[in-house]
Amino acid sequence: MKWFYRCHSCGARYDIVPGRYLCDACATRQIPKRPLEGVLEAQWEGDPGPGSVPLPVEQNWFPCMPVGNTPLWSPMRLRDEFGAPNLWIKDDTRNPSGSLKDRASFLIAAFAKRHGLSEIVLASTGNAASSMAAVGAAAGLRIKVFLPVTAPPAKRIQVLQYGAELITVDGTYDHAYELSLEYSNRTGSLSRNTAYNPLTIEGKKTVAFEIVDDLIKAKGGAPDHVFLPVGDGAILAGVYRGFEDLLRLGRLREMPTLWACQAQGSSAIARALASADAGGDAFGDPIASNTIADSIAVDVPRNGLRALAKLRKYGGKSVVVSDTEILRAQKTLSSASGLFAEPSSSAAFAGWLKARESIAVGDTCILLITGSGLKDVSAAAKGLGLEQIPGETR
Ligand SMILES: *Cc1c(COP(=O)(O)O)cnc(C)c1O
């Protein structure tokens, strides 16, 4: 197979080599505090072989770690309670570091090994960092992460526990993003920043392959709707990318409807979609994010332009939920299915609760549960109305 990068906006073609992140021509249009211009997309030519997932790094470079192949299961009590006979959970909390981010880290680590690079650097709201630290430990790579001070303690502890270097940034995720880029540009370390490194999105597409394959095995047909949490829009793009591959390979007939679930306090992509649909400007000045769902709290969605283009191309939808709805959904999901999801992932469930009336009862709906609730117990404690965690003394 032959692999290359293509600019999602002008179509320019580039080799997949270390140091190549954005399109040379389009990146010059970059405006501060707006989504990245010139984001590249990995493309392939040739025949990937039956049943396989086409990926741009050969399998022999993959870290020895069981990433992906997470369960797709039927939440029977939720199905009964909400009269949704074809509701499914794709449980990506079951990845080694507890989130879907491991899929991206896995491919980035393989790429680093393939090219003899020893250090990976990134900014994160928390999960990308803990994920890269975990996969880096398995692969024997040096990992340096820039995290905002507000990142939940469990995610920071994970970073240190896995042996990565933690740089705490007294500012927002957006600030950490800039600092990490400064560092990687200066040192030549491999950047894993989401959207900026196109392989993050390529790694995340494996979840779409598993959803389609496992639904067939479970005699569940093809997915009609996928509900997922959206911050920077990289998971969204990854899921679209996987479905695009499957369509091209003849393993899927129709593009499912993707529902971009966003928190009210961080809804740039939903706003851009509404504005673009009305013929207006997509992304205006950023609004400071403010939500309990830290993993989807971004001021500027880095992958916003590409995510928006995909939503518009395929008729994707957005749904915005409040923090109260997120916490309520988190509790409902936990107590009626046994799955404890972090607030971002609970936003996907909250989005489904809000949108389900507009969906045909028999349609196959997938809830993409991206991260474990154990990563942020203080958010859940708030949802339970606890001032203090029982048994804890001050
Ligand atoms: C990163 C993350 C998201 C959001 O993904 P984006 O690519 O930023 O849209 C959602 N849920 C979890 C658990 C995450 O870690």
Image (cartoon, rainbow, N blue to C red):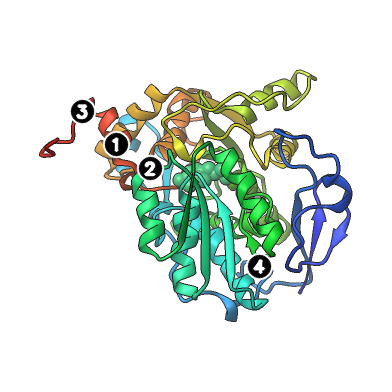
Callout 2, which amino acid? Pro
- Is the residue marked by circle 3 packed among few (<14), some (14-19), or many (20+) residues within 10 Å? few
Question: Which image quadrant for residue 252?
Answer: bottom right
Give the residue pinned by disc 4: 55
**Which numbered tag is attached to residue 378?**
1
* Dots 3, 2 in contact, CB < 8 A: no
**Dot 3: element:** loop
Sooner in the amino-acid sequence: mark 3 or mark 1: 1
Image quadrant for the N terminus? bottom right
Callout 4, which amino acid? Leu
Sooner in the amino-acid sequence: mark 4 or mark 1: 4
Tell me: is circle 4 under 8 Å from ligand 1: no
- Residue 240: horizontal and vertical position, in percent? 65, 48
Give the residue pinned by disc 3: 386
36 vs 204, left or right, is: right
**Dot 4: element:** loop
**Which is more foreground, mark 4 or mark 1?**
1
**Which numbered tag is attached to residue 152?**
2
Asked whether residue 252 is in view, the answer is no
The Cα–Cα distance between marks 3 and 1, rounded to whole angstroms, is 9 Å
The Cα–Cα distance between marks 4 and 1, rounded to whole angstroms, is 38 Å
Sooner in the amino-acid sequence: mark 2 or mark 1: 2
385 vs 144, left or right, is: left
**Which is more foreground, mark 3 or mark 4?**
3
Q: Residue at x 67, y 42 (%)?
A: 303
In the displayed structure, 327 sits above or below 302; it is above
The Cα–Cα distance between marks 2 and 1, rounded to whole angstroms, is 8 Å
**Dot 2: element:** loop
Q: Residue at x 51, y 30 (%)?
A: 360
Tell me: is circle 3 under 8 Å from ligand 1: no
Question: Which image quadrant for residue 256?
Answer: top right
